[in-house]
Amino acid sequence: MSTLVEMAGINKSFGATKVLSDVRFSLERGSVHALMGENGAGKSTLMRILAGVYQPTAGTVRLRGQNVNFRSPKEARIAGVSTVFQEFTLIPNLTVAENMFLGHEPRRADGSIDTAEVVTRSRRLLADVFPLLNPTAIVDTLTVAQQQAVEIAKGLTSNADVFIFDEPTAALNSADVDHLFKVIRDLKSAGKAVVYISHRMNEVFELCDTITVMKDGVWVKTAKVADFNLHSLVATMVGRELQNFFPPRAVNTGEPMLEVSELRLVGEGPTVRFTVKKGEIIGLAGLEGQGQREIMRAVVGVEAAKSVAVCRRATDASMRAVDVASGFSSAISSGIGFIPEDRKQEGLFLSLPIYDNIALGKQLNRHMASVAWRSVSKVREIIKSLRVAAADPAVPVGKLSGGNQQKVLLGRWLLSGVDILVIEEPTRGVDVGAKAEIYRLLRDFSERGGAVIVSSRELAELIGLCDNILVVHDRRIVGQMPAAEATEESILGTALGSHSTHDQRVAIR
């Protein structure tokens, strides 16, 4: 193998803030190189320099033995560097095909865009990567997972030598991950160089040849994958061993906190019923698109269902109906909070400070003219208890890492006083250290008398975090199992209908 990319002495500052310091990084042809580190380690900044988004304050970048200084992503793409960033760069009102070839569309002889050829090429590429994706669909109508697939497909339209994948599988199901891995292995076989950034350790050990670890904007170590194991890699990334990655499960759970019945997502579809107890965390598992998302959102009134009945325990121990059919405000007023998967689009006000985003918890279900300044000390207390990594609560929340943004959303609901929390993909795009923190926060919430419903594409996360797991298939609950006894194989087997247990029959009767 020969060296395709060499970065040496890379420094990057934004104003007085230095984010990269004397970083070195190299890529070999025909290899997959993992770039690892906690959020804020500088991984994405370094790759944005290689991709032409940023220019280094100091240092050199060499591509195919020649010094380069890309002034824009377009320059980098023309030179052979293709990037799939974690943050979507899609145009929502364009089609999948139009987004895939945006800026380098096939042209007719007269210079006009060959629309038919755009669709044809898109369909051909998608057939190998994401065959269920429709090239003529408008991006704004797609789920987060489908948009992630479009972002990946867009990156593959370039005949590049270097491909950078930043958290490419964060929103993908197992089938789409398999498709992507095949594409990456094909790129490797063709002599391309691939940079793979992911917080999913199992993917790194399965796919990559080499690992470079960064911490606090500094290079820490580069070695072959075989030189690491899970514990040594985590310790290198966070600077310490992570003990008790998942907190202990509930020893005892209390009375029912939330009862869901008569939940029907489609007119003649199956009925969903389940109960969540005080002190319990339950997880919804299953293959992508089987109804987990719709069930979660129907329970809190974010999306409408054909029918739904939700009851929650009141202070007098009676179960009282929550009119979620009228919308999310009824859930909030009943003490039920919701954290969406897409925290940037649906959860946070990115331009507002950390303080204001958390303080909104005091305004929920109150007149917008009321003021939150009386809660200053409480907000600061929550910021401290959540260990939000920001020196100043006046910093815009959009400047934070994914893990810290998720903590801010959790802080908002803690301040609001809800005791039931429904949360989609709690650690999507979050580094390993922040994951452990978020798991601790959710378990602390349940131990203080709360109840949590969580969905995740990471089965290991559901197994480690939850007390009980409900398996969803075709908009119905087809299985129920204690998380302590669950395995990824048993969950997938239940989701695919190959397992049959007493718990399953109880769950669907």
Image (cartoon, grey):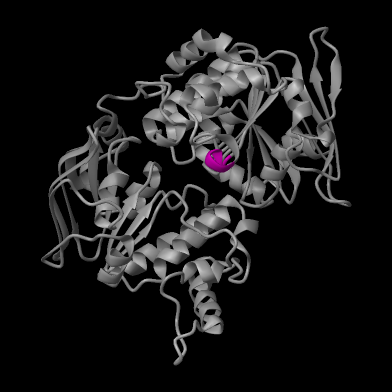
When the figure is inspected, residue 189 is found, relative to residue 175, above or below; the finding is below
Residue 200: % across, % down: 40, 43
Give the total of numbered labels: 0
Residue 417 visible, this angle? yes
**Residue ranking furthest to the bottom:** 109
When the figure is inspected, residue 136 is found, relative to residue 273, above or below; the finding is below
Residue 167: % across, % down: 41, 48
| The N terminus lies in quadrant | bottom left
Residue 442 visible, this angle? no
Task: Give the residue at x 66% y 51%.
Answer: 498
Task: Give the residue at x 51% y 14%.
Answer: 379
330 in magenta? no
| The C terminus lies in quadrant | top right
When the figure is inspected, residue 180 is found, relative to residue 340, above or below; the finding is below
Residue 242 lies left or right of residue 211; in this view the side is right
Residue 169: % across, % down: 46, 51
Q: Which residues are magenta?
A: 341-345
The residue closer to the viewer here, 401 or 258, is 401
The residue closer to the viewer here, 175 or 344, is 344
Quarter of the view holding residue 443: top right
Residue 268: % across, % down: 89, 52
- Please, what is the dominant secondary structure of the magenta stretch? helix
**Residue ranking furthest to the front:** 369
Task: Give the residue at x 39% y 49%.
Answer: 203
